[in-house]
Image (tube, coloured by chain):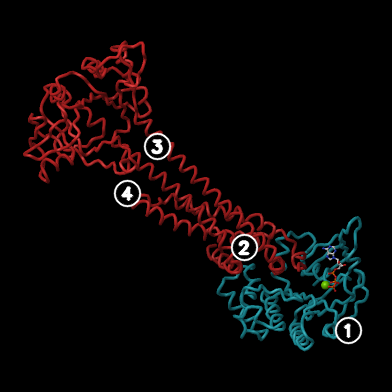
Amino acid sequence: MLIFFLDRFYQSLYALKDNLRRTLLSIIGIAIGIAAVMAVGAISKGGNYLIFSELETFGLNSLWVSRDRADKDPNRMVREGTGISNNDYLALTADCCSAVHRISAIVYGTRGKRNIIQANNRYSNAQLQGVDFSLTTIANDVIVQGRAFRSRDISKRRTVAIIGPTVAKDLFGEASPLGREFRINNRKYTVIGLLEDKSRDFLASIGSAGGQDANNRILIPFTTFQQMLGNKKINYLQAEAVTQVQAAEAAEQIIAILKRHNGRNFTYKSETMASYIATTERILDGVAMIGIIAASVSLLVGGMGIMNIMSTSVLERTREIGLRKAIGARKRDILLQFLLEAVVISTAGGLIGLTLGTAASIVLSELTGFPLAPSFVVIVIALVVSVAVGIISGYLPARRAANLPPVDALRYE
Amino acid sequence: MIHLTGIYKSYRVGERDLPILRNIDLKVSAGEFIAIMGPSGSGKTTLLNVIGCLDSVDAGSYTLAGETIEHATDDELARIRNRHIGFVFQLFNLIPRISALRNVELPMIYSGVSPVERQQLALQALQRMAIDDRADHAPNQLSGGQQQRVAIARALVNNPELLVADEPTGSLDSATGSEIMNLFSQLNQAGMTIIMVTHEEEIAAYAGRIIRLKDGEIAADDKRC
Ligand SMILES: Nc1ncnc2c1ncn2[C@@H]1O[C@H](COP(=O)(O)OP(=O)(O)OP(=O)(O)O)[C@@H](O)[C@H]1O
Ligand SMILES: [Mg+2]
């Protein structure tokens, strides 16, 4: 069976030598189509990496709730404040909301013009955040050295800190920062944990990531931070929904409680990671759709080219078809011969497209840092598509050839 | 070996049925060498195509080597042509892009002979036609006579019982034509049944029996010897 097929395949190569120039055009069409198919594959793969390696650094189930300062309701008294108090937070942490898995208060701000962070005359320009013990879990922060906050660190307002790798380098150089001391606004803090290096290179390169450098953060208990600032304000809340789809519901539940407590004075807004992910996926889908359209158009053009070549070929070789039938070719032999020729053209195009697409994916991998080399599945799809284009576009001409009556074909001038 | 009875064939031209073959009764025994002659348009090629199982008829019956042809399917006809009949044409009908050897291999592709064996048998057939030194030549690198020898090698390579030839010398000069006819005579002496269409009396003279067609009917059937 294999021998038989290779044999027929070999025969079909002869025919293609003849129409080389026309054949090449169709090959290019198919090649572009297949390369586009692979580009779509690389883009969706890249998108997945973006979502699951960089967006994940914010926590895929994360949501944020804060006072809506854009509120311009003239009937409402303008109030100062963040709209979230320690009392509100107490209610929120008391297992309030079915869709909320974890929640953390976030406090930021400065005492004086800016917070001065230093250790032995080495300074850091890190962003300072007061958080609850749950934050590192919510935000997918991995602590590579030391430990996370415990509830006692928060309740006892301990002067302990978890720092990012950039901070560690700025303050302590290459030495391990664990157990070392540094000062924030002249108060001594002890490093109890070191955060894992979080790559947001791609987001940073497209100007996103909220202007935050995840590696240049210092986390301290929000209670300690409030003490330093001399107030009991919580700037915003970061929470983790039970599941990604419940993120919006979780935000609503939190806002409902905040409204019950402060509804006369403040309004609130929320953002969810899920909506960012949805936006990203929508953009990726759009790009993929354009790619699929481009791929379909070039495959169509390539397919029509093949149909054209094969039709001409059938016409030019009418006598050959008659002769082959006279000496014993059955309908299916002729059909197979011309189908194989069409498939050889389309598969040649497919292989070239595969090569180009792979090369492009590798270049793209280098540029973005995502591993975008085509997967086995994409390669199989590309090959199946190119063979299918050959069969579909070769079928009508091949059937015409197979159905030619031998006498008519032999009489053809 | 061949038995045609009451063959009728017509083509529809506009409103009317134009009869091409009428009342054809013909018996051919194994080993005969027959020439079909007649004016242009008298139906010679059509009759030869019917005998060669390339064309269908409207009425009548046909048996070839014990097989009933008129009820055979397309695939069965293809098999019969492949195994039992060799074809030689006026314009040789070699496939231009492939070598002489590969042209001779063609019938064996359709009878499922393995590539290696195919090449050996094709070379032997070319040897018998004394043209094996041109095995690697493309048809356009061969003279008309050489091309016809390759075509005959192709017709014989599957060892058919019947050789069917439509004006095999029609495109050749008379010297080359005689060469081809000598080959035919040799084949016939070796037992091959040959049916050939020709316009030339000198060519027909090689045959042992001459059938003359006129307006689709057998006008004369001269058996010499
Ligand atoms: N497909 C067809 N449709 C209509 N008429 C046809 C067709 N094929 C052949 N004929 C007619 O059948 C008749 C016999 O044709 P055929 O080719 O058998 O003649 P021939 O004796 O071989 O002639 P020649 O000596 O010129 O080759 C001719 O009149 C021809 O025009
Ligand atoms: Mg004729």
| Disc 2 C-beta below 8 A from ligand 1 | no
Q: Amino acid at mark 1?
A: Arg
Percent of width and height locating residue B41: 88, 70
Classify mark 1: residues with Cα within 10 Å, few (<14), some (14-19) or many (20+).
few
Q: Marks 2 and 4, Cα distance to the nearest angstrom?
A: 46 Å
Q: Amino acid at mark 4?
A: Gly
Q: Residue at x 20, y 29 (%)?
A: A129
Q: Check the residue under mark 4 and report the chain it is in.
A: A
Q: A310 or B179, which lies in front? A: A310
Percent of width and height locating residue B46: 83, 68
Q: From this viewpoint, which residue is outermost toward the right?
A: B219
Q: From this viewpoint, which residue is outermost toward the left?
A: A120
Q: Nearer the viewer, mark 2 or mark 1?
A: 2
Percent of width and height locating residue A131: 20, 27
- Disc 4 designates what residue? A369
Same chain for the residues at labels 2 and 4, yes or no?
yes
The reply to whether the C-beta atoms of the residues labelled 2 and 4 are less than 8 Å apart is no
Which chain is in red here?
Answer: A
Taking the image as shown, residue B111 lies to the left or right of residue A63, namely right
Which comes sooner in the sequence, label 2 or label 4? 2
> Helix, strand or loop at disc 3?
helix
Q: Nearer the viewer, mark 2 or mark 4?
A: 4
Q: Check the residue under mark 2 and report the chain it is in.
A: A
